[in-house]
Image: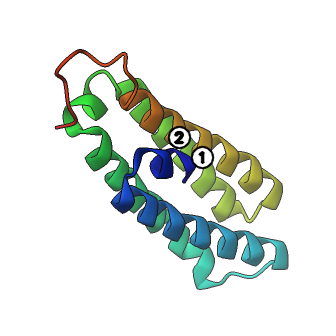
């Protein structure tokens, strides 16, 4: 959320806020040992956040120079979804930190001054 806020990327920030809320609800459900909708709803929210990130950084960057970041985000998302399926709160917490870091790194790197001169998100 901080990376999106600093860039003024309102659509990305809005989706990050929705995803953060879904993650908090999922965390609560995991701690309570519940199989609520909150556990099922986080996966789709994560996918929507990845889509919003792709739009923010530009498809060309996301699938070319940013492919390593995209793969890292996808792997972190997979780890997070596995932790949810297993109902493992500790793994969820670790996986969410990894996902958050991967996503923020992608956004920051895509918008860094080291991008080629004149290159803009597609």
Spatial CA distance of label 2 from label 1 is: 6 Å
Alpha-carbon neighbours of circle 1 within 10 Å: few (<14), some, or many (≥20)? some
Residue matched to label 1: 100
Locate residue 31, reporting x and y percent.
Answer: 83, 72
Q: Quadrant of residue 122?
A: top left
63 lies left or right of 5: left
Is residue 90 visible from the viewing direction of this image?
yes
Q: Secondary structure at mark 1?
A: helix
Q: Nearer the viewer, residue 52 or 67?
A: 52
Q: In the rendered view, would you say 4 is above or below 88?
A: above
Q: Identify the residue at image location x=60%, y=39%.
A: 101
Residue at figure coordinates x 49%, y 52% from the top left: 5
The image position of residue 48, as x and y in percent, is 38, 61
Label 2: which secondary element: helix
Local crowd size for mark 2, using a 10 Å CA cut-off: few (<14), some (14–19), many (≥20): some
Q: Quadrant of the N terminus?
A: bottom right
Q: Is residue 85 above or below residue 76?
A: below
Residue drawn at (26%, 24%) of the image: 64
Q: How is the image coloured?
A: rainbow
Occupied quadrant, residue 102 = top right
Mark number for residue 104? 2
């Amino acid at each position: 959320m901080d990376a999106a806020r600093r860039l003024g990327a309102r659509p990305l920030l809005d989706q990050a806020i929705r995803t953060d809320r879904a993650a908090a609800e999922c965390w609560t459900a995991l701690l309570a040992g519940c199989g609520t909708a909150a556990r099922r709803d986080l996966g789709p929210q994560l996918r929507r956040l990845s889509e919003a990130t792709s739009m923010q950084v530009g498809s060309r960057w996301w699938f070319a120079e940013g492919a390593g970041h995209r793969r890292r985000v996808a792997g972190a998302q997979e780890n997070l979804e596995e932790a949810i399926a297993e109902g493992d709160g500790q793994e969820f917490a670790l996986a969410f930190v990894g996902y958050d870091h991967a996503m923020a790194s992608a956004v920051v790197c895509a918008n860094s001054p080291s991008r080629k001169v004149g290159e803009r998100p597609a």
